[in-house]
């Protein structure tokens, strides 16, 4: 035991920092988690912006959280509660819609109403996706092997992946490759004829990424977003009690219960190093804190170019991180509403809003929304992934009133003719105007509006260029290339300095896997006398 | 029409909704996260009154009714003379000489035939009293708007008031393991009371819930279901289908047994069982090991099924050496625990918290054992339940 009060310091109290700190504390390390803001959560927070109205400022759903974390960190003891979203709704302004409930047979009838052909195609699609997800999922729970290493253990791990792929049937293997390398549109066109259904499904292929449904890479994004698993349901997303801020509060309680200490309002200025090894951190106020292990939960740009002096790192790594793509394209517009919106063909039904609301009536709609982003502007008819969250968790708004989260795309971080400080309110108007076309009278319900542009995401959470995955989640930046070739195993060239943010494998989507896998490496190194 | 499914099941000769809309799990979450309303009216209800009512019940019921003062309710059981459980139910002490007993099956004849010369009248009021349960974290605030004294009513306490001019008795009881109440009203006025409560719940995200959600809630609450987790000794063909209250995990009902001096049916057998430690089983909570479960199903190339809908069947329980040591009777994937849980009985020597056992599943049409461990019931016990 060293004389310092801490064995490990985790920089960043977002979900990965909390997961990492909890695992380190569980593994017996005296752990300190440092958070710059007055609350933990990073981009997974819930804020009471208006009395009684709780906004999920940024991240708005528990998408890909790995179930092991729930069990290993005993999160249910601390209030973990994923609430069921019982419907999904995809309207068009013309009155056509798809409304899915938890009743599978009824959903097939719903599809058949629009396209009898697509009803059984949907079954086949679901089964094919399940098979690919089954094959891919184990990769989410493993430290990527290092293909550049001569270590026999690494070669064995690589061979293990190869032999798993060889075990797949031909169709699943082919589907996996088509998704990993192709576009969502090409894949979906093979199954479906309905524009509305394809627009809906293709929406998962663009989330958080600067791709359109017809871009190569959108297949991978589609597959990635299908890797969820919630409350026993394969492929599902869910919503935590109290929003994602409710979830990170659970993580904080778990971390504290394992013995970790969390210090708020403590931004880190720099990681201290000596002779090529980490020795602690210095806070923005000059306070020095010592520990043998320092873990950065920040994105790779901050981890390698800001927290440490790049001169201490190999040029090649610095260069790769500099070339890493962030280019956030997503915004949030959150509303406090005085009542539930009405969709004219289903004016009496407020149960259509008990889950995600998908504004993307066709793949063309998504592609056009993407087109303008390519040229440095934001869509006038954007893709919206909405959710009136207070229908799921009534504690998020006063009785009869509601909070609505809208994830909006495409809104590129760099605007050609203007900047986000100038465009912020106009973006809010665009989103509100779009919703008005689907839900006449929507504007009259709005009590308050919060617009969170990529610039705001960057300013408030520190995510570079507002990229919600802490670095684009596309093939050149995934698996053993995330965040950089040779540095995908959570270590860094500085001994004792580790990375555990979403910029490492397997990436974002409130998965928690980077935090967990990094902790595994740190604890293993500790046992081996390294670190 | 509140029941949008158009489907009903049968309960004690009445129609009961399994679910009111597509998703019973959504109704379940309404109860765990806001509140739910449930029609409990089909329960059998008996008014037992007279100068000797308490004396009579002290001899009929195994749990000491004399510890339940007027204005309180008590969960109780009644046994046969061999100490086997006939049934369980909640009894309300409504006035010094008046009780209301609820049960899942008809019991009028059984109780009436044992009154003898005592000054007791028993009356079947099942059809005269409607029962509406309001369960969940928002139930107190909701009902206190209509019956203010509800705010002060303790766990298993009772109070009274009027809802829309209809006299109601409210007991802080239920079958969900959550904060919750049951309202007892004249059956003819029950619909009016339901509608008034429903209107008061506007905007609170309260939902009606059906039997499917109730069965999920009651398993997490560790509450047993007659004809599923145990059978009435009256109609059992052999002792394998009989259970003692100790075997069902109700020893806590008999904490004062040594001093209470009552002569009640089954007392001697019960004392003998306790003294000689002859219990065959102990009802326990079983939690399935998630890693082992995923391993067994994943190894077979399957997506591990995690289904919240309770399965009310026998599941075999083995010790780690593979010897059969018990059986489970209710099984589900619990949303609040994110685990498969089962109500099951194991040999008493294995009923220790943390004891490792194995539960048998059918995977790819053959039996597979999956690791599980014993926990104390209830599985889910939020502070608000008794706070």
Image: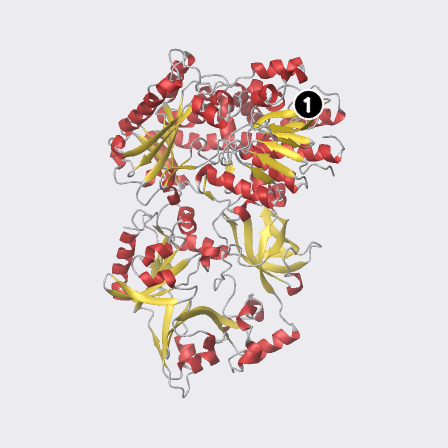
Look at the picture and state if B295 lies above or below B103. Answer: above
Look at the picture and state if A313 lies above or below B147. Answer: above
On-image quarter of the N terminus of chain A: top right
Residue in the foreground of this view, choosing between A368 and B113: A368
Residue in the foreground of this view, choosing between B158 and B98: B158
Q: Which residue is the site of mark 1?
A: A146
Residue in the foreground of this view, choosing between A8 and B214: A8
Rendered location of residue B172, percent (x, y): 40, 63
Rendered location of residue A246, percent (x, y): 47, 41
On-image quarter of the C terminus of chain A: top right
What residue is at 63 percent from the left and 33 percent from the top?
A9
Residue at the far bottom: name it. Answer: B117
- The answer to which image quadrant residue A164 occupies is top right
- The answer to which image quadrant residue A145 occupies is top right
Q: Is residue A155 left or right of residue A360?
A: right
Q: Give the crowd class for mark 1: few <14, some 14-19, many >=20 residues within 10 Å.
A: many
Rendered location of residue B333, percent (x, y): 52, 48
Q: Can residue B41 be seen at all in this image of the molecule?
A: no
Q: Is residue B54 left or right of residue B329?
A: left
Residue in the foreground of this view, choosing between A295 and B92: A295
SS type, badge 1: loop
Rendered location of residue B124, percent (x, y): 34, 74
Q: Can residue A368 be seen at all in this image of the molecule?
A: yes
- The answer to which image quadrant residue B139 occupies is bottom left
* Pointer 1 chain: A
């Amino acid at each position: 035991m060293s004389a310092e009060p801490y064995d490990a310091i985790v920089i960043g109290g977002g979900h990965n920092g909390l997961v990492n700190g909890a695992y380190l504390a569980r593994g017996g390390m005296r752990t300190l988690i440092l958070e710059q803001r007055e609350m933990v959560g990073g981009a997974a927070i819930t804020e009471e912006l208006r009395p009684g109205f709780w906004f999920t400022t940024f991240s708005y759903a528990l998408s890909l959280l790995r179930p092991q974390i729930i069990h290993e960190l005993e999160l249910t003891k601390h209030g973990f509660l994923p609430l069921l979203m019982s419907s999904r709704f995809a309207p068009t302004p013309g009155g056509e819609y798809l409304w899915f409930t938890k009743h599978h047979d009824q959903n097939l009838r719903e599809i058949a109403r629009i396209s009898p052909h697509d009803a059984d195609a949907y079954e086949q699609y679901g089964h094919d996706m399940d098979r690919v997800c089954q094959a891919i999922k184990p990769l989410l729970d493993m430290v990527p092997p290092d293909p550049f290493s001569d270590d026999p253990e690494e070669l064995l791990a690589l061979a293990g992946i190869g032999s798993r792929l060889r075990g797949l049937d031909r169709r699943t293997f082919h589907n996996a490759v088509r998704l990993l390398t192709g576009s969502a549109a090409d894949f979906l066109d093979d199954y479906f004829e309905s524009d509305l259904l394809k627009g809906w499904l293709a929406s998962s292929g663009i989330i958080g990424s600067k791709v359109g449904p017809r871009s190569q890479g959108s297949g991978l994004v589609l597959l990635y977003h299908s890797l969820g698993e919630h409350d026993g349901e394969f492929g599902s997303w869910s919503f935590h009690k109290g929003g994602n801020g409710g979830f990170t509060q659970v993580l904080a309680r778990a971390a504290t219960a394992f013995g970790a200490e969390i210090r708020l309002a403590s931004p880190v200025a720099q990681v201290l190093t000596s002779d090529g090894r980490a020795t602690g951190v210095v806070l923005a106020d000059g306070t020095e804190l010592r520990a043998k292990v320092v873990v950065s939960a920040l994105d790779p740009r901050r981890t390698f170019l800001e927290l440490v002096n790049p001169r201490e790192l190999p040029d090649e790594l610095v260069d790769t991180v500099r070339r890493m793509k962030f280019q956030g394209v997503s915004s949030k517009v959150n509303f406090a509403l005085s009542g539930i919106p009405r969709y004219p063909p289903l004016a009496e039904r407020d149960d259509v809003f008990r889950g995600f609301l998908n504004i993307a009536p066709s793949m063309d709609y998504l592609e056009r929304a993407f087109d303008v982003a390519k040229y440095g502007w934001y869509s006038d008819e954007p893709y919206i992934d909405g959710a009136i969250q207070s229908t799921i968790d009534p504690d998020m708004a006063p009785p009869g009133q509601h909070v609505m989260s809208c994830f909006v795309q495409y809104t590129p971080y760099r605007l050609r003719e203007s900047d986000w400080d100038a465009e912020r309110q106009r973006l809010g108007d665009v989103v509100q105007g779009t919703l008005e076309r689907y839900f006449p009278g929507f504007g009259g319900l709005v009590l308050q509006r919060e617009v969170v542009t990529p610039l705001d995401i960057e300013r408030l959470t520190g995510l570079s260029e507002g990229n919600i995955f802490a670095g684009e989640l596309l093939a050149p930046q995934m698996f053993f290339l995330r965040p950089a070739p040779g540095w995908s195993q959570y270590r860094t060239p500085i001994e004792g300095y580790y990375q555990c943010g979403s910029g490492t494998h397997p990436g974002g989507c409130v998965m928690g896997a980077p935090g967990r896998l990094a902790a595994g490496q740190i604890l293993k190194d500790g046992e081996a006398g390294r670190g | 029409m509140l029941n949008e499914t158009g489907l009903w099941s049968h309960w004690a000769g009445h129609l009961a909704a399994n679910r009111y809309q597509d998703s019973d799990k959504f109704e379940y979450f309404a109860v765990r996260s806001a509140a739910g309303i449930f029609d409990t009216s089909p329960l059998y209800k008996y008014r037992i009154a007279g100068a000797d009512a308490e004396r009579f019940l002290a001899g009929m019921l195994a749990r000491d009714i004399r510890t339940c003062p007027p204005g309180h309710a008590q969960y109780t059981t009644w046994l046969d003379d061999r100490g086997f459980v006939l049934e369980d139910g909640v009894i309300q002490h409504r006035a010094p000489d008046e009780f209301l007993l609820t049960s899942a099956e008809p019991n009028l004849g059984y109780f009436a035939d044992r009154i003898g010369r005592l000054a007791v009248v028993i009356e079947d009021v099942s059809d005269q009293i409607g029962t509406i349960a309001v369960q969940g974290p928002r139930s107190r605030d909701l009902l206190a708007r209509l019956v203010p004294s509800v705010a002060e009513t303790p766990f298993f306490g009772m109070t009274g008031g009027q809802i829309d001019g209809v006299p109601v008795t409210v007991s802080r009881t239920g079958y969900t393991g959550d904060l919750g109440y049951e309202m007892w009203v004249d059956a003819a006025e029950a619909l009016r009371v339901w509608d008034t409560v429903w209107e008061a719940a506007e905007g609170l995200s309260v939902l009606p819930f059906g039997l499917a959600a109730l069965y999920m809630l009651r398993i997490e609450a560790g509450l047993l279901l007659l004809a599923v987790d145990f059978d009435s000794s009256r109609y059992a063909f052999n002792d394998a289908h009989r259970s003692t209250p100790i075997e069902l995990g109700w020893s806590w009902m008999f904490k004062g047994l040594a001093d209470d001096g009552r002569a009640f049916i089954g007392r001697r057998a019960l004392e003998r069982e306790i003294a000689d430690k002859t219990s065959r089983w102990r009802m326990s909570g079983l939690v399935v090991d998630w890693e082992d479960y995923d391993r067994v199903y994943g190894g077979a190339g399957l997506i591990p099924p995690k289904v919240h809908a309770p399965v009310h069947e026998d599941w075999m329980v083995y010790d780690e050496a593979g010897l059969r040591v018990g059986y489970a009777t209710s099984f589900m994937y619990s949303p609040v625990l994110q685990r498969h849980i089962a109500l099951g009985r194991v040999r008493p020597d294995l009923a220790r918290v943390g004891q490792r056992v194995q539960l048998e599943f059918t995977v790819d049409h053959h039996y597979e054992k999956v690791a599980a461990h014993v926990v104390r019931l209830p599985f889910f016990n939020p502070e608000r339940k008794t706070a």
